[in-house]
Structure formats: structure tokens, C-alpha cells
Image (tube, grey):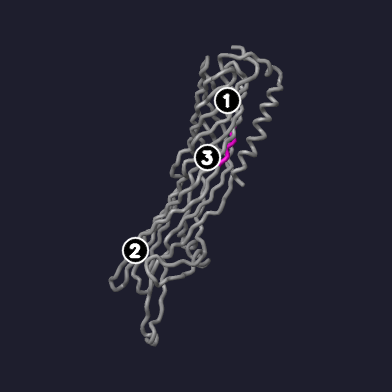
Amino acid sequence: MKSSLPLTILRPVLPALVLVLGLLPGTAGTPPSDSPSDRRLVIGLSGGMVPARLIGTAGFRDSWSSFNLASVTESTSVSTRPNYAFAGGGFLTVFLTPHLGVQLAAGYDRAGITNASTSNTAWSWTDGRSGAGTSTWSGGGRLSRLPLSANIVLREGSGRFTVEFSGGPTYFWNEFSGEAAFAYGVTKISELPGSGGQSIAQAFDALPVRLRIPATKWRTLGADIGAGVHWRIVGGLGLEAEARYFYCPAKALSWNPVQATYAGLYSRDFPAEPFTSDDAVLLDMSGQTLGLKLEMSNLRASLGLTYSFGRRISH
């Protein structure tokens, strides 16, 4: 559903703008120019890459004891990293003078997410025995963004080449979902058969509990700033290379444990142990939650085709 969003916006808007602006007085019959700065209107489509980067980490740490368990320490770290993403977009710039213009730009990028979890568990018994274990998991997810920017454009240069600087407020439509896991320590006490209640056994293990952030959508206001080089190929047709930084406020989310039945990691004493709502409530009440702060700002490098048209501007 989300992948159709940029097409929904760009398909009807950009061709319509070309048609309407082409009917404006002074846009038809304009003789070709050797300088892009002689053109009043510029429309373009671009595509590029958003680099992979670490955008958030979550941590869990707990320590406890129970009966013959002298101490249990648990820790988990989850790092969230989107893969390289293709970014597409389009823009319309109206130059009020040869060097100053206003721009409306829209873009879209969507990346797969890798959530890498590492859990460490250590325990010791009152009789001196001890144990430890480390487990790692890799989970997936999705991150998508649609920025809509209203920019001021500064243009310098003449002939076939110009340099442009632009920036302004940006409104973002964002969506994130993800899956991960963590080790959750459990223990149980049972009476030994035939002991008449005089002898008991205690077992310990850790469960590989799944974590999930369901698809979460939010909107927020940020900004963008960029610089690019424009090269006129022939007539109004041009090529543009650009680097742009998008500032988007961070978003606070939380990993939610999935209630299900899990087999223990380190022994056979827990072949099918349930993680219940009571366990989730206990974690929440003790403050042992995995909060995730997503850093949403990013850099984008793109290459695109432009078409400049409209009446000439007097220098």
C-alpha cells in the first residue's frame, strides 16, 4: 500500500504542472538559449541513493535472584540500521530573477531494516556453580519517508553550467516497522519425586522472546538544504547532480515483547515456556523496557533530468 504513495502524488502532479505552465503567456515559442539562467521555469525528475547508516539502538538490562539462584544478570542491545535505499522525486522551480527562485519538491524513499540483537546472560547458584551464554539474532523491518519541501533557490553561473543552492521547510510522512528478539531469564521450582516435599529442584534458562514494533505512521515538520550542478545538454533539456540533507526530528518508539511459547536457549528444562501478559507487565513495571529513538535525518545523493522553459529573463 505504501509503495503506491509517491506514484499517486508524482504521476498526476508533474504532468499537470507541465501542461498548465506550458499554456501560460510567454512560455510557448521561446527561442532556445545557451544559458539555463535565461529560463524562468524548471521542472525535473531525479533518482538517487540514501546511504545505509545506524539510526537507533535499544538496550535492556536486569539483575535478580531467586531461592538457590544467587544472582542473574541479563543484558540485550538492539541496533537498527536501514539498508541502502533508492530515492526518487520531482520538483518545480519558478525563478523570479536569473538568480533567485522558489521551489516545490517531493520525494520518496523506502529501505529494508536490519535489527541486530545481542543478548548476554550470566547466572550463579548458592552452591558456587555458575553459567553464562550469549545469543544473537537478526530481524527485519521497513522504513519509508515522503518529504514535501518548499525551498528558496539561489542560482549562479552562465553558459551551459550553473550551480544551485536551495533549502527550506520540509513536511515528512514517515512509517516504520521492525522485528527483533531478546533473552528473557526464567526459573521454576519443582518437588523431587518421592521426597515427600523435603527436596526440591530449581531450573534456570533464558527464552528467545520476539520483539516487534508494528507499522507506525507519523507526520512531522523538518527542513532540507542542498547544493547541485546543472548542465544544459541541448535546448531546455538538462542534467542535474545534487546532494541534499534532510533534517527530520527523531522519533521515540518501544520494542514490544510478543506473547507466545518459547523453548529455552541453554537447557532442556524449558521445552515450551509461555511468555505471558503478566511477564510483559512485570517488565514494564520494573522499567525494563527496550526504548528505541530513531534518528530520521539523512543525506541523499541524486542525479536527474530537468527541462527549462518559459520566457526569457532580462539580465
Q: Nearer the viewer, residue 127 or 265?
A: 265
Q: Which residue is mark 2?
A: 122
Going 48% across and 32% down the picture, which residue do you hit? 301
Type of the residue with mark 3: Cys
Q: Is residue 147 magenta?
A: yes
Q: Nearer the viewer, residue 25 or 282?
A: 25
Name the mark on residue 306.
Answer: 1
- The local crowd at label 2, few if under 14, some if 14 to 19, many if 20 or more residues have their Cα within 10 Å, is some
Q: Quadrant of residue 148?
A: top right
Q: Which label lies toward us, 2 or 1? A: 1
Type of the residue with mark 1: Thr
Q: Are marks 2 and 1 in contact (CB under 8 Å)?
A: no
Distance of label 2 from label 1 (alpha carbons): 61 Å
Q: Quadrant of residue 308?
A: top right
Identify the element where label 1 is drawn.
Answer: strand
Q: Is residue 56 magenta?
A: no
Extreme residue toward the left, this view: 128
Q: Which residue is mark 3?
A: 248
Distance of label 1 from label 3 (alpha carbons): 27 Å
245 with respect to 315 (left or right): left
Residue 184, position as x, y percentages in the image:
43, 63
